[in-house]
């Protein structure tokens, strides 16, 4: 692997890790507040899975850069995070969180299938393993999309409102970054834009079956992963508070 590809891959892994970590934190906010006990437990487990996936990506990145995982997670400021804005938005109502997780799950299924064919073996093996867990995530959230979309007038309204809000944010996941060209040419990873058509086909088919109308506006609020909403600042203040209060502690 050339130094240029290694540097590009380290940045790509940061994108992957930050998306998973921030979404995991948001989902964990439902713990103890789910609509039914069984779902409370199920969604908490999904949050734990996403956190584990973030740790996997960070460990791969550590092998390339030497940066300590805890340092990367707890001692970076918001501007240094590279997650998409989709995952940092507040949890909203149940429809909002279920739909966000569904849109992200479909993206992951499409993306991980490509990463599993990476020329960089550690990346390919990690992607293949994570994708197995994501199959169950997608089944779960897809069922909730159907249940709410075809449920009562109120559940349908909430799901449509969530879709209208989240649809443009989800499209930020498919914006190519400068390092994507280097990775694509080396066979290490694909351009995010190449995943969009399959993602759109899979999501629109399922959403339409759930009696939801696909928004016409799909322009993401930003194409820059260094640009965040103010919501990320509050999230990181909470997530990083203990580590920053006791920076020399060993856990």
Image (cartoon, rainbow, N blue to C red):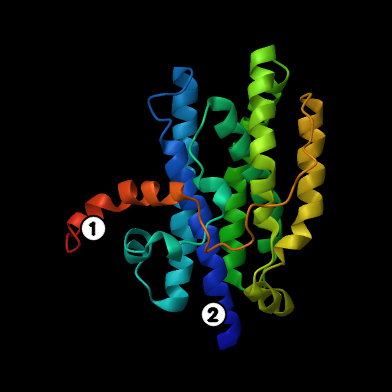
Q: On the image, which quarter does residue 105 sit in?
A: top right
Residue 18 lies, in percent from the top left, at 49, 57
Residue 80 lies, in percent from the top left, at 44, 66
Q: On the image, which quarter does residue 152 sit in?
A: top right
Residue 47 lies, in percent from the top left, at 46, 40
Q: Residues within 10 Å of mark 1 (few under 14, many from 20)?
A: few
Disc 2 target residue? 7
Query: Who is closer to the viewer here, 187 or 193?
Result: 193
Q: Would you say residue 1 is visible in this rendering?
A: no
Q: Determine contact: label 1, label 2, CB under 8 Å.
A: no
Q: Secondary structure at mark 2?
A: helix
Disc 1 target residue? 244
Determine the residue positioned at 48% across, 68% down.
Answer: 60
Depicted 155 relative to depicted 105: above or below: above
235 horizontally vs 11: left or right: left
Q: Quadrant of the C terminus?
A: bottom left
Query: Who comes first in sequence, dot 1 or dot 2?
Result: 2
Residue 19 lies, in percent from the top left, at 53, 53
88 horizontally vs 247: left or right: right
Residue extending farthest to the top is 152
Depicted 6 relative to depicted 243: above or below: below
Q: Residues within 10 Å of mark 2 (few under 14, many from 20)?
A: some
Determine the residue positioned at 42% across, 37% down.
Answer: 28
Determine the residue positioned at 69% across, 13% down.
Answer: 153
Q: CA distance from mark 1 to mark 2?
A: 28 Å
Q: Secondary structure at mark 1?
A: helix
Query: Who is closer to the viewer here, 208 or 40?
Result: 208
179 horizontally vs 24: left or right: right
149 horizontally vs 235: left or right: right
Determine the residue positioned at 44% across, 19% down.
Answer: 37
Nearest-to-viewer mark from 1 and 2: 1
């Amino acid at each position: 692997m050339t130094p240029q590809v290694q540097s590009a891959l380290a940045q790509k892994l940061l994108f992957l890790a930050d998306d998973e970590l921030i979404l995991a934190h948001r989902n964990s906010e439902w713990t103890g507040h789910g609509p039914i006990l069984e779902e409370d437990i199920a969604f908490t487990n999904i949050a734990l899975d996403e956190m584990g996936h973030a740790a996997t990506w960070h460990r791969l990145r550590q092998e390339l850069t030497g940066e300590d995982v805890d340092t990367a997670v707890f001692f970076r400021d918001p501007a240094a995070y590279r997650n998409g804005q989709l995952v940092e938005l507040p949890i909203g109502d149940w429809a909002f969180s279920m739909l966000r997780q569904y849109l992200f799950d479909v993206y992951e299924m499409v993306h991980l299938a490509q990463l599993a064919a990476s020329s960089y073996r550690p990346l390919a093996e990690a992607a293949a393993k994570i994708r197995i867990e994501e199959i169950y995530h997608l089944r779960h959230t897809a069922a909730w999309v159907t249940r709410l979309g075809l449920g009562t007038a109120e559940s349908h309204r909430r799901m449509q409102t969530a879709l209208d809000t989240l649809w443009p944010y989800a499209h930020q996941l498919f914006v190519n970054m400068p390092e994507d060209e280097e990775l694509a040419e080396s066979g290490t990873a694909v351009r995010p834009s190449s995943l969009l058509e399959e993602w759109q086909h899979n999501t629109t088919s399922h959403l339409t079956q759930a009696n939801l109308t696909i928004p016409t506006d799909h322009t993401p609020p930003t194409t820059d992963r260094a640009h965040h909403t103010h919501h990320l600042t509050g999230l990181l203040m909470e997530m990083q508070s203990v580590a920053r209060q006791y920076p020399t502690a060993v856990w």
